[in-house]
């Protein structure tokens, strides 16, 4: 007897779950790309460029949004 939570194909996820999952992975990739960079030309010199808005505020928000989207995709019925 089939479980009522599974789709007609027998897979645990439906098409919309996979779409949300791909969107979440895309957000993670974008967030980590936003977080990268800021290296100085001279490795012994300190660069203030690592403390800008994009790396400190925007990128972590995008990454958390990506993880939240993946969490939603897993729990969505």
Image: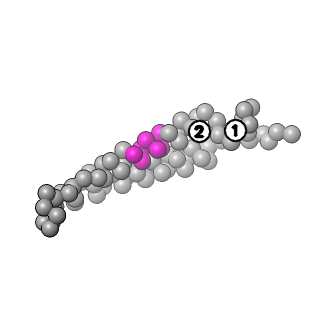
Q: Which mark is residue 31?
A: none
In screen coordinates, is 35 left or right of 38? right
Image: magenta residue range: 23-29
Q: Is residue 26 above or below residue 54?
A: above
Q: Quadrant of the C terminus?
A: top right
Q: Which mark is residue 17?
A: 2
Q: Position of residue 62 (x, y in %)?
A: 38, 49
Q: Position of residue 51 (x, y in %)?
A: 22, 60
For image coordinates 41% across by 44% down, the residue present is 27
Kindly report the distance in space between the C-alpha atoms of the residues bearing marks 1 and 2: 11 Å
For image coordinates 36% across by 48% down, the residue present is 31
Q: Which mark is residue 11?
A: 1
Q: Is residue 51 visible?
A: yes
Magenta span dominant secondary structure = helix
Q: Nearer the viewer, residue 46 or 69?
A: 46
Q: Earlier in the sequence, mark 1 or mark 2?
A: 1
Residue 50 is drawn in which quadrant? bottom left
In screen coordinates, is 55 left or right of 74? left
In screen coordinates, is 40 left or right of 4? left
Residue 76 is drawn in which quadrant? top right
Q: Position of residue 42 (x, y in %)?
A: 13, 61
Q: Secondary structure at mark 2?
A: helix
Q: Residue furthest right?
A: 1
For image coordinates 16% across by 58% down, the residue present is 40
Q: Secondary structure at mark 1?
A: loop
Task: Tell whether position 25 is magenta.
Answer: yes
> How many neighbours does mark 2 have within 10 angstroms: few (below 14), some (14-19), or many (20 or more)?
some
> How many neighbours does mark 1 have within 10 angstroms: few (below 14), some (14-19), or many (20 or more)?
few
Q: Is residue 24 above or below residue 39?
A: above
């Amino acid at each position: 007897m089939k479980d009522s939570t599974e789709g007609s194909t027998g897979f645990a996820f439906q098409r919309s779950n996979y779409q949300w999952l791909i969107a979440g992975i895309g957000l993670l990739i974008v967030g980590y790309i936003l977080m990268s960079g800021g290296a100085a030309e001279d490795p012994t010199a300190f660069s203030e460029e690592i403390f800008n808005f994009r790396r400190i505020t925007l990128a972590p928000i995008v990454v958390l949004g990506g993880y939240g989207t993946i969490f939603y995709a897993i729990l969505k019925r």
